[in-house]
Amino acid sequence: MVKKKEVRKVEKKLLIVDDQFGIRVLLNEVFEKDGYNTLQASNGKQALKLVADEEPDLILLDMKIPGMDGLEILREIKKMNVSSEVIMMTAYGELEMINEAMDLGALTHFAKPFDIDEVRQEVKNYLTVKEGK
């Protein structure tokens, strides 16, 4: 007998972009448990393809990624006609880069190592607000 999946509202899509495998896995597990449809990318090219194909509701974007850094990825996302919002993550306290990301439209940023509960709450807050629009 096939179990019927419980009917619930459409899952919010969350794209995790980080070149560090461990961080992607951690964030993926946490947000899947919270009921989000999670996607992962380890570089800019993968991230931009997923944004174009899937149009995630929210993107957690690392600032330092080899090849195309987070600011370049953010600039490209903003050129696309998508409603995806972006939260930046950085292990570096580079105020200038953070300010530039905010100027480009990032919602906020988190410094690594981050408090996972704080990140979860911010993601929930932004996706709840977006849902209410």
Image (cartoon, helix red, strand yellow):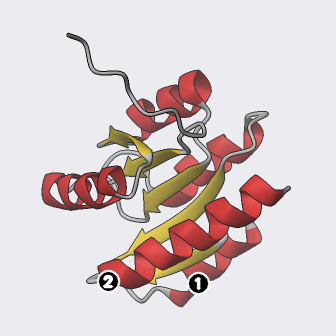
Q: Residue at x 45, y 46 (%)?
A: 15
Q: Residue at x 39, y 75 (%)?
A: 90
In the image: residue 84, left or right of residue 98? right
Where, by quadrant of the figure, is residue 106 drawn? bottom right
Please say if 85 is above or below 112: above
Q: Name the residue that disc number 2 marks.
A: 114
Secondary structure, mark 2, is loop
Name the image quarter holding the N terminus. top left
Secondary structure, mark 1, is helix
Q: Amino acid at mark 2?
A: Phe
Q: Residue at x 16, y 51 (%)?
A: 21
Please say if 55 is above or below 17: above
The one of 87 and 5 positioned closer to us in this rendering: 5
On residue 96, which mark appears?
1
In the image: residue 35, left or right of residue 21? right
Badge 2: few (under 14), some or many (20 or more) residues near its Cα, within 10 Å? few
On residue 105, which mark appears?
none
Where, by quadrant of the figure, is residue 87 drawn? bottom right
Please say if 121 is above or below 34: below
Where, by quadrant of the figure, is residue 44 drawn? top left
Place of residue 93 in the rendered image (x, y in percent of width and height, measured from the top left):
41, 89
